[in-house]
């Protein structure tokens, strides 16, 4: 076990924040608020026009190339590869969880092959719902950390926080399912959700969303008036999450707003969390990474560069052999013209989706702070590690 202790962790004021006040506000909270602000301004300026890009994979050709590169390879796909630092490149974690880290990709690939055998739409529908669950669970994970750091919080208040987090994320998705004719975006591709149009029920869900938020706000004011300390990080996270899911899905109702808010609020906080974790665990990383993380924040450049290279490489494969949409960006016109991969999508799609699928599954195990995750509990400040 590494010799790091709670006092060695990056940042300060660990009692109420995951890393530190400045770090949390800058990297876990601000990205969502900033994305919502940009989405509002862009909507007023009508930019970009007539786009058709969901949070994963729809008609990417409709986005300006620079924006597509920034949002998809730059953030969305890059955050997937940060799992390498969290697990596969951490020697101690690899040795302790070798079975999990080895079998998960194998399971994901076989399962994806089986899914795709039922058809393209079945595959993308299944992974769309898995992605929705994954996106929600990440916000739940951040909330759980802030709630546990809230002094004097009872089990009932923790439950109320968690149920509220699920409400402000699931209700907009339910509204989406009930209003397919008015939604101008998809998650991965057209038809990947099962829709149940019902205008009256949709209005009821809309009203319930705001009633729930109001009820939660009143409850937090009540806790505060009773001299109980409330975690500012928790309140900001709930507010952030509510805005991102409501504005991106219900209010602005355009694909750019949905993509921007969803991708930024999900990808950047995760990358920032893994970067902080990797800095804490640097002695367990390969020497080349250990040397980089000894330089503190300067390690961010090589860290991000590695993620972008891996993400760009994956997107090159997708574009060359499956989507064939961005030849000007990837310089792969000759590969596309050769029509390599045609007829082999049944194996190429599950193969290329493997990093993302593996990330979805591993995330459910790697970030749980149980006793078998002592290095994580130490990183989060819940446990002092042995020297």
Image: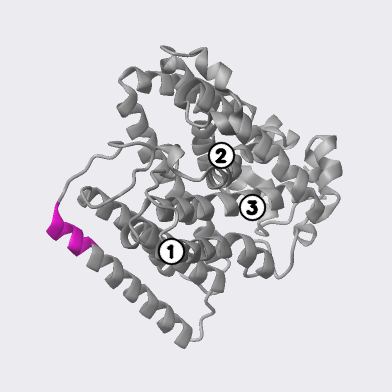
Residue 163 visible in the snapshot: no
Residue 289 picture quarter? top right
2 or 3: tag closer to the N-terminus = 2
Residues at discs 3 and 1 in contact (Cβ within 8 Å): no
Label 1 vs label 2, nearer the camera: 1
Q: Which residues are magenta?
A: 198-205
Residue 311 on image: x %, y %: 61, 35
3 or 1: tag closer to the N-terminus = 1
- Residue 206 sits above or below residue 62 on the image: below
Q: Residues within 10 Å of mark 3 (few under 14, many from 20)?
A: many
User: Which element is circle 2 on?
Assistant: helix
**Quadrant into which the N terminus falls:** top right
Residue 94: numbered disc: none
Residue 64 visible in the snapshot: yes
- Residue 194 sits above or below residue 38 on the image: above
Query: At 83% across and 44% down in the image, what residue appears?
Result: 292
Reading the image, the residue beneath label 3 is 273
Is 62 positioned to the left or the right of 1 in the image? left
1 or 2: tag closer to the N-terminus = 1
Reading the image, the residue beneath label 2 is 77
Query: At 34% across and 17% down in the image, what residue appears?
Result: 117
Residue 357 on image: x %, y %: 49, 32
Reading the image, the residue beneath label 1 is 45
Residue 168 picture quarter? bottom left
Query: At 85% across and 36% down in the image, what residue appears?
Result: 287
Query: At 45% across and 48% down in the image, what residue appears?
Result: 135
């Amino acid at each position: 076990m590494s010799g790091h202790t709670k006092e060695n962790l990056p940042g300060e004021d660990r009692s109420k924040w995951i890393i530190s006040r400045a770090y949390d506000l800058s990297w876990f909270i601000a990205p969502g608020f900033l994305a919502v602000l940009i989405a509002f301004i862009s909507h007023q300026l009508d930019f970009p026009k007539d786009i058709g890009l969901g949070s994963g994979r729809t008609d990417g050709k409709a986005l300006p190339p620079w924006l597509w590169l920034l949002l998809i390879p730059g953030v969305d796909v890059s955050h997937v590869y940060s799992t390498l630092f969290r697990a596969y490149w951490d020697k101690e974690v690899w040795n302790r969880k070798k079975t999990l880290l080895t079998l998960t990709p194998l399971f994901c690939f076989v399962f994806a092959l089986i899914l795709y055998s039922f058809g393209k739409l079945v595959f993308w529908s299944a992974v769309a719902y898995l992605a929705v669950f994954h996106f929600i669970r990440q916000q739940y994970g951040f909330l759980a950390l802030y709630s546990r750091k809230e002094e004097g919080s009872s089990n009932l208040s923790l439950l109320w926080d968690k149920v509220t987090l699920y409400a402000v994320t699931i209700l907009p998705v339910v509204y989406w399912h009930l209003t397919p004719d008015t939604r101008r975006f998809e998650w991965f591709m057209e038809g990947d959700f099962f829709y149940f149009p019902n205008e009256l029920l949709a209005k009821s869900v809309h009203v319930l969303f705001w009633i729930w938020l109001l009820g939660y706000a009143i409850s937090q004011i009540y806790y505060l008036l009773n001299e109980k300390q409330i975690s500012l990080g928790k309140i900001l996270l709930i507010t952030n999450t509510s805005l991102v899911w409501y504005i991106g899905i219900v209010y602005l109702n355009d694909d750019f707003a949905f993509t921007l808010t969803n991708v930024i609020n999900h990808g950047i906080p995760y990358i920032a969390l893994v970067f902080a974790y990797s800095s804490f665990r640097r002695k367990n990383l390969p020497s080349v990474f250990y040397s980089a993380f000894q330089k503190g924040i300067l390690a961010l450049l090589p860290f991000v560069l590695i993620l972008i290279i891996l993400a760009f490489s994956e997107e090159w494969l997708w574009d060359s052999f499956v989507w064939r949409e961005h030849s000007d960006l990837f310089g792969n016109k000759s590969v596309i013209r050769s029509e390599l991969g045609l007829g082999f999508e049944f194996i190429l799609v599950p193969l290329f989706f493997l990093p993302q699928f593996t990330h979805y599954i591993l995330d459910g195990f790697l970030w749980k702070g149980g006793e078998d995750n002592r290095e994580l509990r130490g990183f989060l400040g819940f446990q002092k590690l042995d020297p």
